Image (cartoon, rainbow, N blue to C red):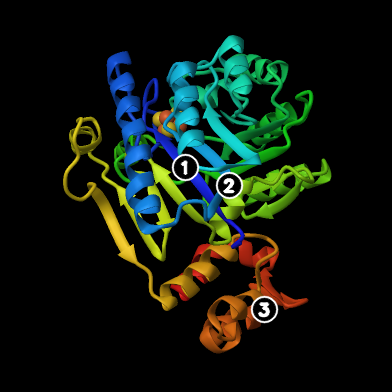
């Protein structure tokens, strides 16, 4: 009998209490009724697409779901009952492995102890909490709805509710940020009890269409310069590494055994199905994403009968050359880099033949290094990762 392949599932909940000033994710506020109608449509989508993309293609039983990730938006703006219903439907439609990692994102001030208990009992076993900063003025400046005290309460509730696998998100390079602010946030995270197993630490990027972009155009946004951005980034990495975390990806650190299975799957090219507004999938040698228009989504999945093709915002059949490029771009984000032999096993080509020029150039420049059959970024290379990765497109 053929062994089941690993599959990951992402569920997008596009609602937030209010839009943060820096955020360009597909998220917006919604009424209780809109949220309930959205979940009803989402359940239809899961069942419909399971039939059309898996069962109808004779793929039933060939996949074991090893990770489910509820992201957003803010999944916890939904009543826990709705989140549990989505998870129940996924269990009915797919085979979830016994030890599947089941994560939900949660923003402080959107989940009570009882809510978290309910989610833990329903089988969610990993929680990702958006702290972003432990400095209240910074939280206000970036438009978050919580303060540091509320984060601490949510964290304590998550621990009490039985979550042992916790991620905390922090953001650096915030407007007007100083070294002391970064230190305060790091001190706060490291004084949590128990400390979180996983920390995501991204630098703020000024995104088009955000409140921050408008402020920037009006000369009202004071972001740290590039040198400070890098200084803060390395301050985070060095401090957390001294505390026992390992940087396993450019912006992610974990204590041993707490690396995020979902993200690793994404960076190492595992197949995944994304459900919900705008959610992307990588399945059957294609990348595609559900429509980003709520109206189109609700017209199709909210109605009783579905006819025609599901509304997509993008769909791309991947060639071998696309897949090789993704292997490099995603795999090099991991600090272990890519394995030369694995590239050959997947594509029957030698990576040094396919990417002769960029590899030669960046290894000579000291931005990439090759050791023990792997190619990875040097520390200096991590600072200019985007510049290097552009050469593998
Ligand atoms: S809570 Fe997260 S998804 Fe929602 S607006 Fe803020 S940054 Fe965006």
User: In percent of the image, x 37 and y 63: which residue is there?
Assistant: 286
User: In percent of the image, x 64 and y 83: which residue is there?
Assistant: 364
Mark carried by residue 270: none
Nearer to me, 5 or 107: 5
Circles 1 and 2, Cβ within 8 Å, touching? The answer is yes
Circles 3 and 1, Cβ within 8 Å, touching? The answer is no
Circles 3 and 2, Cβ within 8 Å, touching? The answer is no
Q: Position of residue 181 (x, y in %)?
A: 64, 31
* C-alpha gap between disc 3 and disc 2: 23 Å
Q: Position of residue 202 (x, y in %)?
A: 56, 45
- Residue 304 at least partly seen: yes
Does label 3 or label 2 sit earlier along the sequence? 2
| Label 1, residues with CA under 10 Å away: few <14, some 14-19, many ≥20 | many
- Residue 174 at least partly seen: no
User: In percent of the image, x 69 and y 29: which residue is there?
Assistant: 184
Quarter holding residue 304: top left
Q: What residue is disc 1 on?
A: 10
Nearer to me, 93 or 275: 93
Quarter holding residue 376: bottom right
Q: What residue is disc 3 on?
A: 341
Does label 1 or label 2 sit earlier along the sequence? 1
Mark carried by residue 262: 2
Nearer to me, 233 or 121: 121
């Amino acid at each position: 009998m053929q062994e089941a392949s690993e599959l990951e599932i992402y569920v997008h909940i596009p609602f937030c209490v209010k839009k943060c000033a820096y955020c360009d994710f597909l998220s917006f506020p919604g009424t209780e009724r809109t949220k309930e109608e959205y979940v009803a449509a989402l359940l239809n989508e899961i069942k419909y697409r399971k039939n059309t993309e898996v069962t109808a293609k004779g793929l039933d039983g060939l996949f074991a779901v090893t990770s489910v990730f509820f992201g957003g938006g803010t999944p916890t703006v939904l009543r826990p009952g709705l989140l549990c219903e989505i998870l129940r439907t996924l269990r009915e439609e797919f085979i979830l492995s016994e030890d599947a990692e089941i994560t939900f994102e949660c923003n402080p001030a959107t989940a009570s102890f009882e809510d978290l208990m309910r989610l833990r009992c329903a089988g969610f076993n990993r929680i990702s909490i958006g702290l972003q900063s432990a400095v209240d003025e910074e939280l206000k400046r970036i438009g978050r709805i919580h303060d540091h005290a509320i984060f601490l309460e949510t964290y304590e509730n998550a621990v009490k509710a039985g979550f042992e696998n916790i991620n905390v998100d922090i953001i650096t390079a915030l407007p007007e940020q100083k070294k002391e602010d970064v230190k305060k946030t790091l001190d706060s995270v490291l004084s949590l009890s128990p400390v979180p197993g996983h920390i995501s630490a991204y630098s703020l990027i000024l995104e088009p269409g955000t409140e921050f972009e408008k402020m920037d155009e009006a000369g009202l946004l004071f972001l740290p310069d590039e040198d400070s951005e890098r200084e803060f980034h390395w301050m985070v990495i060095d401090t957390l590494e001294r505390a026992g975390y390992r940087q396993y990806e450019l912006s992610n650190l974990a204590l041993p055994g707490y690396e995020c299975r979902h993200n690793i799957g994404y960076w190492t090219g595992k197949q995944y199905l994304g459900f919900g507004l705008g959610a992307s999938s990588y399945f059957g040698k294609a990348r595609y994403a559900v429509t980003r228009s709520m109206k189109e989504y609700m017209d199709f999945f909210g109605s009783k009968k579905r006819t025609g093709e599901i509304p997509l915002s993008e769909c791309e059949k991947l060639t071998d050359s696309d897949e090789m490029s993704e292997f490099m771009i995603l795999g090099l984000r991991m600090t272990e880099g890519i394995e030369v032999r694995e590239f050959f096993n997947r594509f029957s080509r030698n990576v040094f033949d396919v990417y002769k020029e960029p590899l030669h150039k960046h290894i000579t420049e000291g931005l990439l290094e090759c050791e023990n059959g792997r190619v990875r970024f040097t520390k200096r290379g991590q600072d200019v990762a985007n510049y290097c990765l552009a050469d593998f497109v």
